[in-house]
Amino acid sequence: MTTIRTGRVAGVRPLSSAMPWVFFRTMTDDDLKAIFAYLQTVPPVRHRVSNTDTPTFCPLCGRRHGLGELNFGGDPR
């Protein structure tokens, strides 16, 4: 919850702009816990994203992010 409220991971590294944390930072603790619980039930996707590598074009999502060039088109699941 601290990461979503501050936009920083462990108070140090800023979240990627791909994470729209500013829209979630004012939610209640209960709402954030509910979102987290729901996300734990969703199967992970095969979509490589890195916040530390140089951004490259990703054909999977059409955006630029670290490891984007390692993704291929189609269903990311």
Image (cartoon, grey):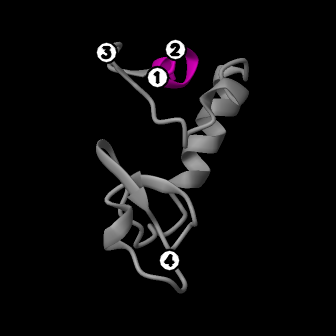
Lower sequence index among marks 4 and 2: 2
Give percent across and percent down for residue 10: 32, 19
Say whether marks 4 and 2 touch (CB < 8 Å): no
Q: What residue type is labelled 1?
A: Thr
Q: Is residue 51 left or right of residue 59?
A: left
- Going 65% across and 40% down the picture, which residue do you hit? 34
Asked which secondary structure carries label 3, the reply is loop
Q: Name the residue under label 1.
A: 3
Q: Give the range drawn in magenta.
A: 1-7
Q: What residue type is labelled 2?
A: Thr
Q: Residue 12 carries which label?
A: 3
Q: What residue type is labelled 4?
A: Pro
Asked which secondary structure carries label 2, the reply is helix
Say whether marks 2 and 1 touch (CB < 8 Å): yes
Q: Name the residue under label 4.
A: 76
- Going 56% across and 67% down the picture, which residue do you hit? 61
Q: Name the residue under label 2.
A: 6
Asked which secondary structure carries label 4, the reply is loop
Give percent across and percent down for residue 9: 37, 24
**How far apart are the two marked residues, 2 and 1, measured between alpha carbons?**
5 Å
Q: Which amino acid does label 3 sit on?
A: Val
- Going 59% across and 34% down the picture, which residue do you hit? 33
